[in-house]
Image: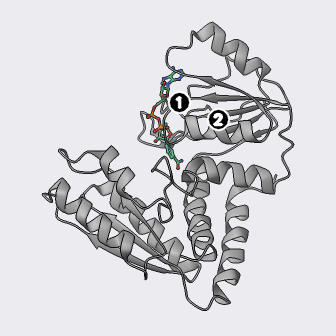
Amino acid sequence: MLPIKEYVMKKKSELKDKILIMAEKPLLKIIQVNDDYASSTYVNGKIKDINEIGATVELEKLPIDISEKDLLIKIEETNKDDSVTGFIVQLPLPKGINEEKVKIAVDPKKDLDGFNPLSHFESATPKGILTYLIDQNYDFKGKNALVIGRSNIVGKPMAKLLLAQDMTVTVAHSKTPIDTLKKLVKEADLIVIAIGKSGFLNHSFEYKKSAYIIDVGINRNEENKLTGDCEKDLPVAFQSPVPGGVGLLTRLALLINLVEAKENGF
Ligand code: NAD
């Protein structure tokens, strides 16, 4: 497996080459309606990525006391704006604004986050993970996949994508008894864990030596260090690192979605 950092650099350079020969550069618009520190860090990361591949990015910050109605009007205007290839509404949204209403207001053809159920795009984290595994020639067919976590943005779409790769997919969640989970982990060829619990998959579980583990979790441990949902150095064939793993693949997937949107004529 090519380490994720190197893989992402290679893919970005391929995207840059594609954009270089486009008659018109793709434009990503980011709508931000919060003063959240973490959210602004993500936005800055996205802006840096877009600049790196030679696309264009426009950030529109809206007042945090904006009404839901006015935000929906802004989204409608952006849907109709032909200069915008695709856009995202950065989460979280202020209290009092219905996130689900906002998600479905984004035109499915421009919904690069894949949050609208009708979106033409896959949700960035599962898409980033799948693209990485495909590009590394991972042999999915008939193997056991275990997805731990069933959120709408990671667990569920991840399970769907792995099913489409002919894997036998099981989804575990907070109500899965620990003994059941231990059995599932022992039999899994590919584990994708997204639960938000530092070091949850640890050395007390038994794993297949040939297993691949994709760690989606982003947590802070007692020393305030960034950690995943897995302990380090599990006895498996591949374990994605945190930091420097799925976060990078998620950022990459947004870029891939943007270029695809442009190639599809938006
Ligand atoms: P979430 O926080 O919405 O839900 C957590 C899920 O974990 C639930 O489905 C729950 O059933 C499951 N769960 C909780 N405890 C469990 C247990 N003991 N055993 C089995 N399942 C359990 O999920 P999310 O939004 O997908 O986020 C999960 C983690 O992934 C968080 O740490 C988040 O920060 C991280 N994340 C990272 C990226 C990235 O780009 N790297 C993207 C999205 C989310």
Residue to which mark 2 is pinned? 159
Residue at coordinates 64% horizontally, 30% vertically from top-left? 147
Q: Residue at x 68, y 42 (%)?
A: 161
Q: Give the crowd class for mark 2: few <14, some 14-19, many >=20 residues within 10 Å.
A: many
The mark tally for this picture is: 2
Asked whether 77 or 218 is in front, the reply is 77
Secondary structure at badge 2 equals: helix
The residue at 73%/62% (across/down) is: 7
| Labelled pair 2, 1 in contact (Cβ < 8 Å) | yes
Residue type, label 2: Ala
- What amino acid type is highlighted by mark number 1? Arg
Q: Answer yes or no: disc 1 within 8 Å of ligand 1.
A: yes
Instruction: Decide: is 3 above or below 264.
Output: above
Choose between 207 and 77: the one closer to the eye. Answer: 77
Q: Nearer the viewer, residue 78 or 15?
A: 78
Q: Is residue 33 left or right of residue 154?
A: left
- Tell me: is circle 2 under 8 Å from ligand 1: no
State left or right for residue 85 relative to residue 20. left
Q: Residues within 10 Å of mark 1 (few under 14, many from 20)?
A: some
Element on which disc 1 rests: loop
The location of residue 90, given as percent across then percent down, is: 36, 58
Q: Is residue 30 above or below residue 176?
A: below
Q: Is residue 240 left or right of residue 247?
A: right
- Tell me what residue is drawn at x 53 percent, y 76 percent: 266
Where is mark 1, residue-wise? 150
Q: Is residue 230 above or below residue 139?
A: above
How far across and how far down the image is residue 182, in percent? Answer: 68, 14
Front residue (pair 244, 96): 96
Pick whichever of labels 2 and 1 is earlier in the sequence.
Answer: 1
Let me know if residue 256 appears in the view: yes
Q: CA distance from mark 2 to mark 1?
A: 9 Å
